[in-house]
Image: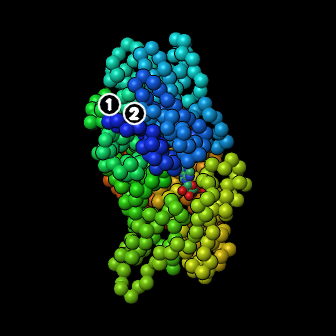
Amino acid sequence: MTEKCGVVGVSLEARSAARPLYYALYALQHRGQESAGIVTHDGFQQHSHVEMGLVGDVFDEDDIDSLAGSAGVGHVRYPTAGSVDSSCAQPFSVSFKSGSLGLAHNGNLVNADEIRDELAGLGHAFTSDGDTEVIAHDLARNLLEEDLVRAVKRTMGRIHGSYALTISHDDTIMGVRDPLGNRPLCIGELEDGYVLASESAAIDTLDGDRVRDVRPGELVVLREDGSGFDSYQLVEEERTAHCFFEHVYFARPDSRIDGTLVYEARRELGRRLWEESGVETDVVMPVPDSGRAFASGYADGAAETTADGDPREEDDPGVEFAEGLMKNRYVGRTFIMPTQDERERAVRLKLNPIKSTIEGKTVTVIDDSIVRGTTSTQLVNLLKDCGAAEVHVRIGAPPIVAPCYMGIDMATREELIAADRSVAEIREAIGADSLAYLSHEAVAEALGESRADLCLGCVTGEYPYDIEDEATDREVDRPEIGGAPVGADD
Ligand code: AMP
């Protein structure tokens, strides 16, 4: 069971924490739409409201008023296809001899079953099959014997995998990031306290100032009087494994993650896409909304140089940037529709082309990623139906060849269009005139990190933790990733 989510923790001088937590969860809604929850602490009294649904539907005024106390944690949970399991909704709360815990988790442990079996053998009763409960029980057990910092350290020594956690232990709020920093977590300062959140956009929403990212392996403890925070570097690793897909797709463009503004990263990825595989079409258009920043960077690149890399002459009209696809913002994510038929229908409901920007023209469409290939297949069809003379597809990430085991809901291997196809075969499957992905190197350069410090598991099949996966055994020839585009004649 993976936890693909957004987490937050707030500690204020005196004001109720429930409302800022609620607003922060609103800001993190894109990280999870299945359930939302807040746990607050009022001295030793714990209050919890956790339900299935969107943040705006889960809480009403009375719920927020009932969540007393100036400290608390919150969570939004990502939906997995067909999942309606409220037992995994978070924050997870547990009361034990020396206090109560509230725990919100984003990530995925690789050894949760092992620890669960061990704790169950010691008499712990579990109510869900989620990782979060395992962490909560392990920590509760350690807190019976150790102080807070040592207890967290001991738990960190036992759990393996990705995690960004916000934890309440009575009135004390903490944030922990896994030793490789796979999932994001940052610290913000408010007028009367501090906040920990998956993304800095949540801090902005609270009119706070982002202080910094929580470091990989670091425990941050917010002071109960809201006056500051204390840092404990509990585990140190030589490398990091920041998830590149946060920058490519998952995070909000207005968030800063591991020092890089996501919007700028996407524009840079788009610019490199132009450099690596630009094609001189009449127009370039994004797949809204996720392709927008990529397409704007790509168009900027196209304004400066030609596809051959020469400076663009002044009288050369270049490639026009156009918003040729309109999105119906009331349609949910196509990705989580349980059947392929529904997913195809949903793409059509979600995206509608503006015929006049397309008819008779050669068109490049830019998206951040291809997962199953549903969106791009439907789009190429749509654009051709609208009279596009040619449709070229450019993708701001490398082919997704393997599932994510680190906390992003991707798809199963069988569903991934690139799992056992070459780029040429994918081009054919989606019906585009040409197709190109971005190279692994360009991703690392655009994010300003070395390849070794990124988790590229979904595009390489090599994970930072020991995962049993056959991704690396495939016999598909993929040397052409990110190089020249693959066209119909290839
Ligand atoms: P697909 O239609 O299955 O190829 O999915 C590709 C589309 O889904 C792209 O437009 C992406 O922006 C979006 N996408 C990529 N990864 C995810 C994810 N983990 N969850 C939801 N949507 C995603």
Which quadrant of the figure contains the N terminus?
top right
Q: Is residue 213 above or below residue 465?
A: below
The residue shown at (28%, 30%) is 232
Q: Taking the image as drawn, is residue 473 in sight?
A: no
Cα gap from disc 1 to disc 2, whole angstroms: 8 Å
User: Which amino acid does the dot numbered 1 rest on?
Assistant: Glu
The single residue placed furthest to the top in the displayed view is 122
SS type, badge 1: loop
Q: Is there a contact, CB below 8 Å, between mark 1 and mark 2?
A: yes
Which is more N-terminal, label 2 or label 1?
2
User: Which amino acid does the dot numbered 2 rest on?
Assistant: Ala
- The residue indicated by pointer 1 is 224
Q: Please state which of residues 417 and 407 is positioned toward the viewer in this rendering.
A: 407
Tell me which colouring the rendered structure shows.
Answer: rainbow
The residue shown at (51%, 79%) is 282
Q: Please state which of residues 264 and 452 is positioned toward the viewer in this rendering.
A: 264
Query: With 116 as the anchor, is 316 left or right in this view?
Result: left
The residue shown at (50%, 75%) is 322
Q: Is residue 446 above or below residue 308?
A: above
- The residue indicated by pointer 2 is 71
- Quadrant of the picture in which ligand 1 is shown: bottom right
Disc on res. 233 = none
The residue shown at (45%, 42%) is 19
Which quadrant of the figure contains the C terminus?
bottom right
SS type, badge 2: strand
In percent of width and height, residue 480 lies at: 49, 59
Counting every numbered tag in the picture gives 2
In percent of width and height, residue 279 lies at: 48, 73
For label 2, the crowd category at 10 Å Cα-Cα, with few meaning under 14, some 14 to 19 and many 20 or more, is many
Query: With 370 as the anchor, is 226 left or right in this view?
Result: left
